[in-house]
Amino acid sequence: MDHDIKTLTARLLAQRWLPRSDRMVRRALVDEAFRLELDRRLAEVGMQLLDNPYAAHVGVALQPEMAEPVFGAGREYAASNLGLGRDEIALLVVIWSLIVLPKRERQVTRRELADDGQADMFGGDKPVAHGDSVSGSLQEASLVADFGPRLGGKTKLTIALGKLARLGFIERRGGIIGEGPLLDVALDYRVMADRIIHGTLGEVLAAAGHRLPDAGPSDADEPLPDDETDATA
């Protein structure tokens, strides 16, 4: 086990995220002793595992108490430790709202993109889906048209999209913006969803013609057993 723990810890620190389908990640999600040792080793260097059962990836981040010692005694790091400016963070939140909020609604109700709006009496028995079957995409041109004037214009927004892609929050393919490995891991759904849906940003998104759920899925905060039960798979 020691070799696997060391390997997984090193991979997480080097790569920042790994898919839930990875053999060692799956073991960490179902093997309690393995997970405890992984958490201990990450904690020794001030890190923690980011594990959201609705996300397709896991990641690593600083423990909250380590943010100030690592990034400085002031508060400036709170908005800039990834090199993102205020407009870029605002764009990230908009993209998160348009991709993750509808995705979470599908996951909680066990619907997929192909059957949006259709009832399934057996939907609650399905495992939580990840990936393209539930995660929608955005047209880059539409995003620029809707929010470019509020976020510094087309050129600035296009540059910001490139930065978000390099950081792993989004993926860009042929003018389409999709979910990146960190979008649903690094941003805390429990903190953000209600504030967006019932806050000013919800009104801004609605005015731009983007429908959001009426409220955050009530059971999205509840821990889920991982779909995999074979720790050695």
Image (cartoon, rainbow, N blue to C red):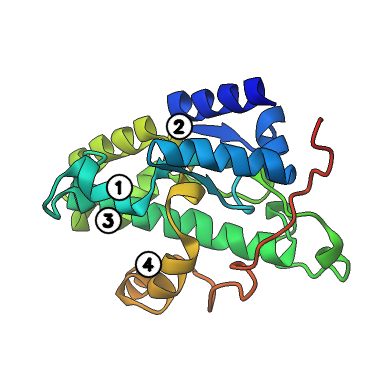
Kind of residue indicated by mark 2: Arg
Q: Residue 90's mark?
A: 3
Q: Mark 4 or mark 1, which is nearer the start of the sequence?
A: 1
Residue 87 appears in the rendering? no
At 44% from the left and 45% from the top, the residue drawn is 139
User: Disc 2 on helix, strand or loop?
Assistant: loop
Q: Mark 1 or mark 3, which is nearer the start of the sequence?
A: 1
Q: Nearer the viewer, residue 207 or 123?
A: 123
Left or right: 82 in relation to 34: left
> Looking at the image, is mark 1 or mark 4 nearer the viewer?
1
Q: Mark 3 or mark 2, which is nearer the start of the sequence?
A: 2
Q: Residue 169's mark?
A: none
At 43% from the left and 48% from the top, the residue drawn is 186
At 61% from the left and 28% from the top, the residue drawn is 5
> Looking at the image, is mark 3 or mark 1 nearer the viewer?
1
Q: Residue 16's mark?
A: 2
Q: Is residue 232 above or below residue 200?
A: above
> Looking at the image, is mark 3 or mark 4 nearer the viewer?
3
Q: CA distance from mark 1 to mark 4?
A: 34 Å
Left or right: 171 in relation to 161: right
Residue at label 1?
Answer: 66
Q: CA distance from mark 3 to mark 4?
A: 12 Å
Q: Quadrant of residue 166?
A: top left
Kind of residue indicated by mark 4: Leu
Relative image position of residue 82 (x, y in whole percent): 26, 40
Kind of residue indicated by mark 1: Met
Q: CA distance from mark 2 to mark 1?
A: 17 Å
Kind of residue indicated by mark 3: Ala
